[in-house]
Image: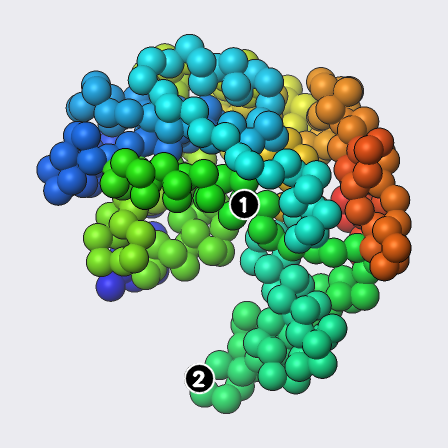
Amino acid sequence: MPTIEELKLYQALPLDLKVEKTKLRVLKWVKTFGVSGVYVSFSGGKDSTVLLHIVREMFPEVEAVFVDTGLEYPEIRDFVRTFKNVTILRTKMSFKRVIQIYGYPIISKEIAGHLYYASKAVAEGRQDQNLDFLKLSGLYLDKNGTKSRFNFERYKPLLDMPFKIGSYCCSVMKKMPVKRYEAETKRVPIVATMACESNLRFQKWLKSGCNAFDVKRQISQPLSFWTEQDILRYIKENSLKISSVYGEILPKEDQLCLDCFSCQEELCTTGCSRTGCIFCGFGVHLEKGETRFQRLKRTHPKLYSYCIYGGSYDSDGFWKPDKNGLGMKHVFDELNQIYGDDFIRYE
């Protein structure tokens, strides 16, 4: 079983050793399943661009798979089309419809999941037995019978919001098309996720490490022990082309990035630091400097207007997207009333 100490040791390695360890994990994965039995999950982002470069240096014929959800930056979609041997999958449900059914993606995938299931438990009168509700109430106990660190009572007020909150957008729009693809092709994925990106990914690494052979869905995460700085250094040192939405990668002494202003990292992008889904609210409250929505307003004003404006209450009293837009302004304003005006900055 992987340990926290092991992860910290790997994360502290120099980049050249990380590259070699990543190649060893890719080699073992491909030897196990064969070149025709694996694929690279390619989002068009900088992390998966690095992964695809490493894998195809070893196995040039490996297929890449891109899920076109309609939520990617236009620059990302254009960038993906410059690569050969990329299978494009599409979702069967729009983001607008996902929100209408499952709720808005805000705070984090983990918190949104707790809020979604706790809300259902409250509506059905079984909250006292619901683990999600207990965590949001600060009543979740660890194995020693003391208060667990996995309590999130700060976000319990969000159970009373006039809109749904949920984490199903990724499952419906990304995971479902991929599951269909994997069922049809019998191929297993190589993905570019890193343990440093979120608590969920950290916990996942602790369970199975980089190559998860003994799980229901076998998956390779050969960059798990990399950091954001490793990705940027690899791109610079190998002169990789990345999507124009990231801008340039600059060293600290030359940084004038709009993303963070006071960035202290060795390397930084002048455009987006992360891409992903452009309307996603996960983690925006943690962003310093110019947030993703403020940047979207500056760089893609039409997409910004669709995301922020519109929305209306349905017959049950829930705020939802409508024909005029997703209505995220109202959602952000409600959160700012609870947590302060600067909690989510979008204007």
Which residue is the site of mark 1? 172
Q: Residue at (60%, 83%) from the top-left corner?
A: 129
Location of residue 144 by image quarter: bottom left
On screen, residue 24 versus residue 329, left or right, reads: left
What amino acid is labelled 2 in the image? Lys
Q: Residue at (60%, 71%) from the top-left corner?
A: 132
Which residue is the site of mark 2? 143
- In the rendered image, is residue 71 in sight? yes
- Residue 173, given in percent of the width and then of the height, sits at 54, 40
- Residue 97, given in percent of the width and then of the height, sits at 68, 42
- Residue 232, given in percent of the width and then of the height, sits at 43, 26
Location of residue 308 by image quarter: top right
Q: Residue at (27%, 58%) from the top-left corner?
A: 215
Crowd band around label 2 with a 10 angstrom C-alpha radius: few (<14), some (14–19), many (20+): few
Location of residue 6 by image quarter: bottom left
Q: Nearer the viewer, residue 130 or 231?
A: 130
- Residue 57, given in percent of the width and then of the height, sits at 21, 20
Crowd band around label 1 with a 10 angstrom C-alpha radius: few (<14), some (14–19), many (20+): some
Q: Nearer the viewer, residue 37 or 167?
A: 37
Which quarter of the rendered picture does the N terminus lie within?
bottom left
On screen, residue 151 versus residue 299, left or right, reads: left
Asked if the residue at tag 1 contacts the one at tag 2, i.e. Cβ–Cβ closer than 8 Å, the answer is no
Nearest to the eye among marks 2 and 1: give it.
Answer: 1
Q: Is residue 226 above or below residue 319?
A: above
